[in-house]
Image: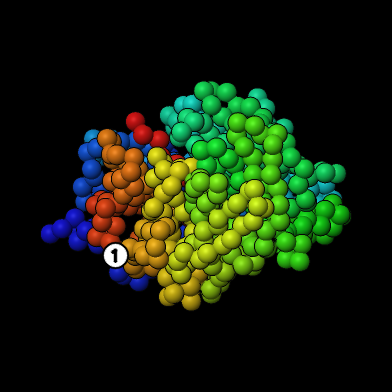
Amino acid sequence: MTAAAAVAPATSAPPAAATPFRDLTREHGFEPLRLEGRLPEALAGTLYRTGPALFSSFGRPYAHWFDGDGAVSAVRFAGGRARGAVKLVQSKALLEERAARRALYGGYGSVAPGLRRFFPRVKNAANTAMLALDGRVLALFEAGLPTELSADDLSTLGERDLGVIPATFSAHPHAVPARNAVYNFGVRYGRRCQLDVFAMHGGTTRLLTTLPIPMTMVHDFVATDRHLLFFLPPLRLRALRLLMGFGSLAQNLAWRPELGGEVIIVPIDDPTRVTRFAVEPFFTWHFINAHEHGDELVVDLVRYPDFASNAWLGTVAGAQPHGGSYGTCHRAWIAPTRARVRFEQRSTLLCEFPRVAPAREGRRAEVAWVAETSPAAAARSGLPDGLARLELERDHQVSWQPGGGQLPSEPIFVPRPGAAPDREDDGWVLSLIYDPASDSSHVAVLDGRDLAAGPLARVHFDHHIPLTFHGTFVPG
C-alpha cells in the first residue's frame, strides 16, 4: 500500500453541524498529534498559523470574517513525530470585553456597539499572519501592533512596537534573503493618510521612510533584492461617514475605478528617491513574488478586476454563500524610467494564498504554491478545495484535491535541508486542512516534487481549528 493510499481522506457524510466557522472548542499546549503515514525524518521545525477563531462577542456576531478574534496554532516536527498546540490570542481588547462581559469594539467590517460607533476603536485581533523575527514569534493584524507569543506554549506576551512603529504594522511582511532582512509597512489614517515603511535586520527595526498616500487601503506589497513596490488600488475611505458612525471601515471603502491606481517604487538603498506613477485600476489581496530583469521590475500577483471579493469575504463565515469573486495569476512588467506598466494573465486557475520557495523571494521564481478553488467549489461555497503547483513561466499547473469537502489552507513550502536554491520543489508542502467528516483539522505533508500523489503523512488534532489565513515555518 502506498503512503498516499494509506492516508486517503474519509468520504462519509459530514455531520450537519460541522463547520470551520465556529468558535475554537479547545485550547492546549504542545501535545502529541496522531500520525497517519510517515513523516520525513529530515522535516524539522515549527509551523505557526493564525486565523479568526471566535466569531462573536457576547452574543454579537462579527459582521466580517476578518473581525474574528485570532488563535495561533503550532505544529512542531522532529524525528518523524509531531506535537501540536493552539491557543486564543489574549489581546487587550478581548480581555477588556471579558472583564466588562459585553462587546466594546468594532472591527474592519463590524460597527462598534452603542455610542462607541462615533469613536471607533478597532480590536487588534492578531488573526492574519505570523512573523518569526530574531527568535521571537509575532502574530500580525494590519490595523494594530504585532502581538508577541511565547514559543514554548503560545501564551500571549503582549503588543510590541519594535521600538519604531508609530501606529500599525501590516500583516504581510516580506523577506529579502539577499539582504538577510525583512521589510514591512503600516498605514496611518488621520487628517492625512501616511504609509510607513520598515526594515528589520540584525535584531534592529528601523523606519525607512514615510510617504503621503490617498485615503485608501493597502493590504500587501512586494519586494525585489533592491526595491519595495506598492500598488495603491482605487479605493477611497469615506472618513467622515466612518467618524459619524455610518457603517464600518469595510462599508466605507468605495471602489472608484475612474481615479485609477498608482504604483510606488521605493529603492531600498535610497528610500528618499521614490518613483510614483499611475496604473490601470485593479485590486490584489496578495502578491506572489517579484524580481528584477534588466531595467524592468517583474511582479507576479493574484489579480482581481475590482473589490467585489470583499463583500463575499464578509459573508462567508456566516452564511456559506454560493460562489465568490476570484483572482487569477497575472504578471506585471514595470518600466520605472518610462512610467509604464503592462499586465499579462499567466494562468486561468482560480487561486489565492500564494507562496514561493524561501530562497527565491525577491528573485526570479518559476514555481508558486497556491490554494486552488475548483469550478465545482466555486459553484458551492467558493472556498479553496485544493492545492496547486503553478508554473509562473507557462500556463501549467499540477493540482491535488483532498476530496470529501475538506478545506485546505495556504500551502507553505519547506525546503529539504541541503537542497540547492534553484530546486524550487525539493522539499515539502504543508497545509492545515479542515475535514468536515471528522469535524477536525490536520496538517498534510506533501512532497513538492510530486504534489499530485497526495500526502506523505497527516498529523491530526483531535478537534477542529477554524480556517486560518497565513502562517510561517521556522526550521530547527
Residue at 24 percent across and 37 percent down: it is 42
Residue at 52 percent across and 61 percent down: it is 330
Name the residue nearer the viewer: 422 or 253.
Answer: 422
Kind of residue indicated by mark 1:
Ala
Q: Position of residue 20 (x, y in %)?
A: 47, 59
Q: Which quarter shows the C terminus?
A: top left
Judged from this view, the residue extending furthest toward the left is: 1
Q: Position of residue 227 (x, y in %)?
A: 58, 40
Q: Is residue 428 above or below residue 233?
A: above
Residue at 51 percent across and 46 percent down: it is 294
Q: Which quarter shows the N terminus?
A: bottom left
Q: Position of residue 452 (x, y in %)?
A: 28, 61
Judge left or right: residue 434 versus residue 298: left
Q: Secondary structure at mark 1?
A: loop
Which quarter of the figure has residue 312?
bottom right
Q: Position of residue 472 (x, y in %)?
A: 45, 41
| Number of numbered markers | 1
Q: Is residue 381 above or below residue 142?
A: below
Judge left or right: residue 171 versus residue 235: left
The residue where tag 1 is placed is: 10
Q: Is residue 263 visible?
A: yes
Q: Is residue 57 above or below residue 472?
A: below
Residue at 51 percent across and 55 percent down: it is 300
What crowding class fits label 1: few (fewer than 14 Cα within 10 Å), some (14-19), or many (20 or more)? some
Judged from this view, the residue extending furthest toward the top is: 203
Q: Colour scheme in the image?
A: rainbow
Q: Is residue 115 visible?
A: no
Name the residue nearer the viewer: 9 or 250.
Answer: 250
Name the residue nearer the viewer: 305 or 387.
Answer: 305
